[in-house]
Amino acid sequence: MSKKYYIYSTAAGCTSNLWESAVYDDYFKSEDMTRVFKADDADVIVVNTCSVTPGFEDQSERYIEKMMKTQMNGAADDKKLIIAGCYSAIRAEKIDDSYANQNKNITHMKPVEMEKLSTSLGLDHEKTYKPITTNRFDDITNCHSSIAHKIVWGIRKAVRFIYGLLGITDSYLLNFLDTMIFSDGFYVIEVGHGCAGGCTFCSIKQSRGFVHSQEELTVLDTLNKGLEQGYKNFWLLATDIGAWGLDRNKNPADLMAPLYERKEDFRVVLNYLEPRWLLYHENIHKYLKDHKTIGVTVPIQSGSTRLVYHSGRRYDPVAVADCVSSIKEKNPNLIVKTDIMVGLPSETWTDFYQSLKAVFRFDVIVPIVFGVRPGTKAERDPEMISTPIKFFRMGVITIVALSWQIFLCVRGFVKDIFGIFKFKKETKVAQS
């Protein structure tokens, strides 16, 4: 009888996390294991964690505790708990002290550390493991999702249905909904992982390591396979696409050129593009201006140049926003998403005001409240902002960002509907 496995992601908004869950799913299936959707029914439980903020870390810890109490407390000797993801990578010592040292059936691993996964399950890594990837996200029903996530997914389904009836395909609103959070129906291509940044507040490099780039011809072959299977939507996944090629003496234009030379009609989302690379690699702007590109995330983190530099990042956020505006003049339906972090060490009210103004330069804004990450330089910064002030600023920027995004969606919907009537009117005139 085949073993049964259960996978749960604690981060619905992280595309890398959902892709990794799909990698684990495909790997277990390749070992003739059966997926179940209740932890009670599983022989192997994988908790795919997130630690980008203290909030996500707390969420991960709560779910691990739940599994410990309900599944591993007096569980059968052969029941396994695998703690994976970024939280597992940066909190390994804590997991050892709290769980793994007390229970031999508990294992923790870094993201997609497949050799350790196979070894923990008693599989012969050298004999059975083949480097495995996947071209999809795991289903959204298998992850922690908030009310906001459910609302967006519901609206997306409704808009897709209505626009399908109306024959609308090229639309700002469709692009907005398809690129917000993450979308089903996309063919995922991992183009690289790892980070080359030096942010004082971020722990991504601890969990993901330095840049590792996929060969551009490998990426092109994967795109071709997706096109052959009938896919029209592609999601290029990387920790930072702008850093692609640093390990191979190349730059992102070398990656994008062969993809965009294809004549087929398809859409592309670029997962993450750090702002400094947007300014530095001017030769990639033409690909962002191409209507094939429907979305890109450019996380400025703050609207204040002073605070950006204080946080170990090297760019002017105003110059980044101006660059985005220039690109959107050629590709107005391009959705440019950004992250803005409030409460960073030494953030003044003037810095916060600059961040508020930056909200109106982007299409999708993800407000994040600063929280100390273990092992980062910001952990030792003497200019910490008080908790009440951080959460007040978070509340203000969340309301402003949400209001702006609702306005953009309504404006896009009105434009699409009036566009239909205008097209029908022009058609009638031409026929007469």
Image (cartoon, rainbow, N blue to C red):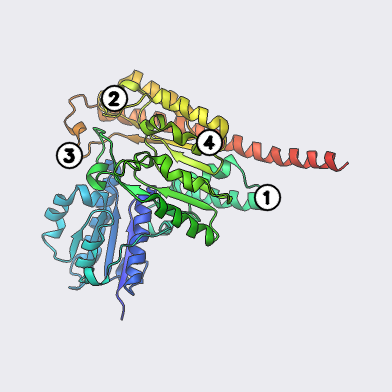
Is 364 drawn above or below residue 58 in the view shown? above
Q: Which residue is mark 2?
A: 309
Question: Label 1, label 2: how many angstroms apart (C-alpha)?
Answer: 47 Å
Q: Earlier in the sequence, mark 4 or mark 2?
A: 4
Three-letter code for the amino acid on which mark 3 is drawn: Gly
Is 301 drawn above or below residue 304 in the view shown? below
Which one is closest to the eye, mark 2 or mark 3? 2
Q: Earlier in the sequence, mark 4 or mark 1?
A: 1
Which one is closest to the eye, mark 4 or mark 3? 4
Circles 1 and 2 in contact, beta carbons < 8 Å: no
Q: Earlier in the sequence, mark 1 or mark 3?
A: 1
Q: Quadrant of residue 381?
A: top left
Q: Earlier in the sequence, mark 1 or mark 2?
A: 1
Three-letter code for the amino acid on which mark 4 is drawn: Lys
Q: Residue 85's x, y, as percent?
A: 27, 53
Quarter of the C terminus within the rendering? top right
Q: Which mark is residue 289?
A: 4
Q: Which residue is mark 1?
A: 167
- Circle 3 residues within 10 Å: few <14, some 14–19, many ≥20: some
Circles 4 and 1 in contact, beta carbons < 8 Å: no
